[in-house]
Amino acid sequence: MASIQIEKLEKSYGHVSVLHGVDLNIEDGEFIVLVGPSGCGKSTLLRMIAGLEDVSRGEIRIAGNRVNDLHPKDRDIAMVFQSYALYPHMTVAQNMSYSLRLRKIAKEKIAAAVSAAASKLGLDPLLERRPKALSGGQRQRVAMGRAIVRQPKAFLFDEPLSNLDARLREQMRAEIKKMHGDLKATSIYVTHDQIEAMTLADRIVAMHGGVVQQVGSPLELYDRPANLFVAGFIGSPGMNFLAATYSAGSVILANGTRIALETVPALAPGESVTLGIRPEHVVVVNDGSGMQATVELVEPTGFGIILHLSLHGLPFKVFTLDRGALNYGSQISVRFPSQYLHLFDSSEERVA
Amino acid sequence: MKRSILPTIAHRLAILCYVAFALFPLFWLLKVSVTPNDLLYSEGVRLWPSRTTWDHYAFVLQHSAFPTFFKNSVIVATSTAVVVTVCASLSGYALSRFSFRAKYVIIALMLLTQMFPLVMLVAPIFKILSPLGLTNSLTGLVIVYTAFNVPFATFLMQSFFDGIPKDLEEAAMIDGATKFIAFRQIILPLTLPGIAATLGFVFTAAWSELLFALMLINGNAAATFPVGLLTFVSKFSVDFGQMMAAGIMALIPAALFFLLIQRYLVQGLTAGAVKG
Ligand SMILES: Nc1ncnc2c1ncn2[C@@H]1O[C@H](COP(=O)(O)OP(=O)(O)O)[C@@H](O)[C@H]1O
Ligand SMILES: [Mg+2]
């Protein structure tokens, strides 16, 4: 196991710049999740760490050693591909042992490592099969097995679960987390799914447009998103945003409603801001004291209900556990508890 | 569910018609090769002669230079097939996987070579090979055939390599393989159907090539079998029986060759590599 440092890392394809200076310090044994929308450069970053893409500028260090110009085979890292990339002409056992055979490890040791990994992943009865005779979930396990037999310096995962159905994805997610608890291996996991990021990560790296937006624990990103992008990306259903104007310790919404803030941000009066609040933090009140809103759509999730509201003509979502009869067109009133308010300035950075 | 049997029958019948149509010349070859000379013109058009004979075969094997032609053809076709396939595997891999500056220029040039009618090139090629002592030699033929087959074979192999996911090589490199080991242990085994197809294609092309064989070779010593067949045509007559017997025998190695490679021609070896 090893730590990984990334410094001012840039990547461009010809004139197209894909990563614009990424800095990241990954501790030994940490589980890092790179999350962001499709095309933001997550895979590119991961593949650069693996050595599959050249570094345009900047530096990557694994266990303190600069690896920029090292061939992937000499970096001693394992990777699980989104497509699994199993060798079709080899059996499951041969797939799993390939890296060890390339290293000319003794036959008995290889057999022991393969059978240990196989029993950990429940692959024992499948060892002599070819990938083509496996289900998607089994292939995914073989891909994991191929990575863990090696005990590499670090594990890289590129959206390993995105080809599985929802149930299996949930199950594998838990297994990956459990496996990380056992192996304590430095892991970098790429996903566009914020739930996967929240549930798996020690620290999340939220990326957008080739730039790291925020690095922190899942709850840090949830509680204190650094900017509008992270606020909107983390959490489901997504955070509500309302345009507002700052005015001495409170904000004034477009419709004139004044909302008091808990802390006083460093803003000039009259500055335009964006107010954010998560659907699950909005309180539905019955005494008519809050803001009036019209229910436009009701989405029961079983656990709770997502209400799509029209708040003075603006779309707005509320998540509530109250199963009361809330129907299309009915009027309700909502309140924003001040401890749950997020405030972003005109450059989209968090101010409160 | 009740399935109508009519479409199946029509389908089978269509295939049968096609096979009969395609194989009929071969049947005629066989028929003439076993027809005695005195019956060839006297019996009219019949599907099978009233009397058959192996005389033509015996004559061709014992009294003609056919065994030499045969041996020459095997040498030329096999060497060409092997050399072309090795070259085309490497160049096809390069075109499929690497990006380099002159890539599209090279592709354009290779396409260009496929556009000329070969007849135009006979004279210049003779002019080039003659001072090198490569006319009237099997080596010369192999060189010319290789040159003409490599471009197409390269495109063929490239398309096979394109069909193999890049992830597989990357996974192999991460597993600790060099680029070359990944090529040899992962990509090449998966390309066996492509290699077999290329081998077969080039072998048949070289086996039946006539133009260059005729122009670059004179005399029996280095003649290949298509040239040899022409020796059965004399100024005054064509000895059809012997010619057809030679033709039948010339089919044997090509048939054997395909029998040998047909198990690799079966597609679907890459199934299960990626996704589910
Ligand atoms: N070989 C390439 N040539 C040019 N652009 C590329 C290449 N590979 C990726 N890109 C671009 O880089 C950006 C980031 O891609 P990628 O890292 O795969 O995104 P992600 O994995 O976050 O979805 C995309 O906009 C993509 O179009
Ligand atoms: Mg990706």
Image: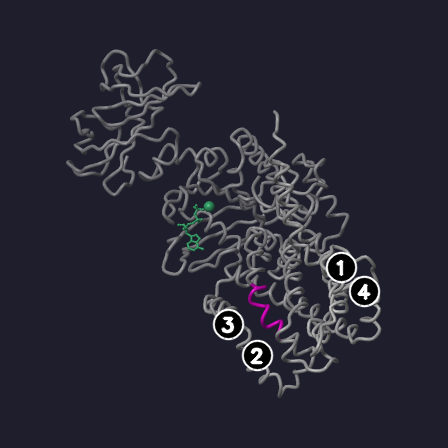
The magenta stretch is B144-154
Q: Which residue is mark 4?
A: B36
Q: What is the chain identity of the residue bearing mark 4?
A: B
Q: Which residue is mark 2?
A: B122
x, y percent for residue A246: 19, 34
Local crowd size for mark 2, using a 10 Å CA cut-off: few (<14), some (14–19), many (≥20): some
Q: Are marks 4 and 1 in contact (CB under 8 Å)?
A: no
| Above-or-below relation of A189 to B25 | above
Q: Which mark is residue B116?
A: 3
Q: Quadrant of residue A233?
A: top left
Q: Quadrant of residue A255?
A: top left
Q: What is the chain identity of the residue bearing mark 1?
A: B
x, y percent for residue A303: 44, 19
Q: Quadrant of the C terminus of chain A?
A: top left
x, y percent for residue A338: 28, 25
Q: Earlier in the sequence, mark 1 or mark 3?
A: 1
Amino acid type of the residue tagged 3 in the rendering: Phe
Q: Which residue is mark 1?
A: B31
Amino acid type of the residue tagged 4 in the rendering: Pro
Amino acid type of the residue tagged 2 in the rendering: Val
Q: Which residue shows up at 52% across the image and 62% down it?
A: B98
Q: Secondary structure at mark 1?
A: helix
Q: Quadrant of residue B118?
A: bottom right
Q: Earlier in the sequence, mark 3 or mark 2?
A: 3
